[in-house]
Amino acid sequence: MSGFDVWSNNTGFTWAGKSPGLQADFATVGVSHDFGKTVGWQFVDGRDFSRAFASDSSGFVLNETAARFMGLKHPVGETVQWNDRRFKVIGVVKDMLMSSPYEPVKQTIYFIPRRAGNFVTIRINPGSSANAALTAIEAVVKKYSPTAPFNYDFVDAEFALKFAAEERIGKLASFITALAIFISCLGLFGLASFIAEQRTKEIGIRKVLGASVANLWGLLSKDFVVLVIISGLISAPIAYYFLDEWLQKYEYRTELSGWIFIAAGLGALGLTVLKVSYQAIKAALMNPVASLRSE
């Protein structure tokens, strides 16, 4: 029952002012009078189909892309000929993504067909139970078509399938990222331990000469912080380039903001300081006498 997709494309359209060489190829969607109300059409001009107007059987509702494609500044009231039939444009609605999210919305014409199609689009009240609603709908279907199988799809689930590959890539990337962070933390912890061990005598001497725990912590942490900042400055432009290239394949996409990279850099810096601080403070609190005797 979802039917929320574009199943046909047609040519053979002409209208006043059409360029002679223009290939007029439109997505055509046959609907009922209540389709717009069901899917939530947003009109920018004109009106919806209405049973109060018998002439609407020869009416067109265009999406914004179709109006631009046709070069019509005021499309409502214009006559469009489709093969041997003449239609009048009664409304223009905002573009609605029905097909691929990777491609621009195609110029689309909605019309009332002479006979019903193969799909029924139904909007279930959000406050009601989906199971109860489906049971009631099935009873109505069986009443009018006892032999027809009752097959249905949910629009949100069908639309989510268009992003199935991205979801798999996202989960895999999350796992690899978590693994990389874990391995990096192990390496960072081991390197901090090694450097603290190598500088045990230096730490003892500095402590005898009056260095505070904060001074020693800064001494041991400084090199790590500088390296993280340098790596962030190098990696951020590279990450931006590849992420922006990936987003370009989507017609509708978010924009990359600088705060994302700043937050990632601060997170890496904070994690580094946290790991290094343990070893730095541990070394700074060590008895200086023991440190000097270890030589």
Image: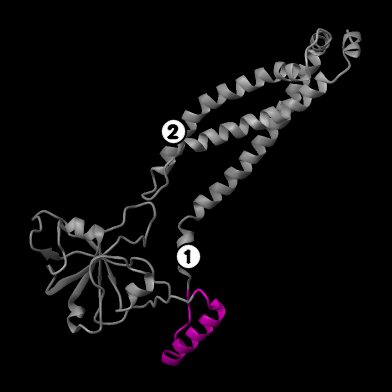
Q: Residues within 10 Å of mark 2 (few under 14, many from 20)?
A: few
- Closer to the camera, 289 or 173? 289
- Closer to the camera, 46 or 194? 46
The residue shown at (84%, 9%) is 208
Measuring from the top left, give residue 65's x and y in whole percent. 25, 57
Query: Magenta span covers which residues?
Result: 126-152
Q: Amino acid at mark 2?
A: Tyr
**Residue 99 on the magenta span:** no
Residue 289 drawn above or below residue 57: above
Distance of mark 1 from mark 2, alpha carbons?
32 Å
- Closer to the camera, 241 or 94? 94
The residue shown at (16%, 56%) is 23
**Residue 133 on the magenta span:** yes
Is 36 placed left or right of 53 in the picture?
A: right
Which quarter of the picture shows residue 85? Answer: bottom left
Determine the residue located farthest toward the bottom in the rendered image. 143
Which quarter of the picture shows residue 46? Answer: bottom left
Q: Amino acid at mark 1?
A: Asp
Is 141 placed left or right of 60 in the picture?
A: right
Measuring from the top left, give residue 189's x and y in whole percent. 74, 27
Measuring from the top left, give residue 261's x and y in whole percent. 51, 34
Identify residue for label 2: 241
The quarter of the image holding the C terminus is top right
Does dot 2 land on a helix, a strand or a loop?
helix
Picture disc at residue 156: 1
* Comes first in the chain, label 1 or label 2: 1
Residue 123 drawn above or below residue 10: below
Is 51 placed left or right of 72 in the picture?
A: right
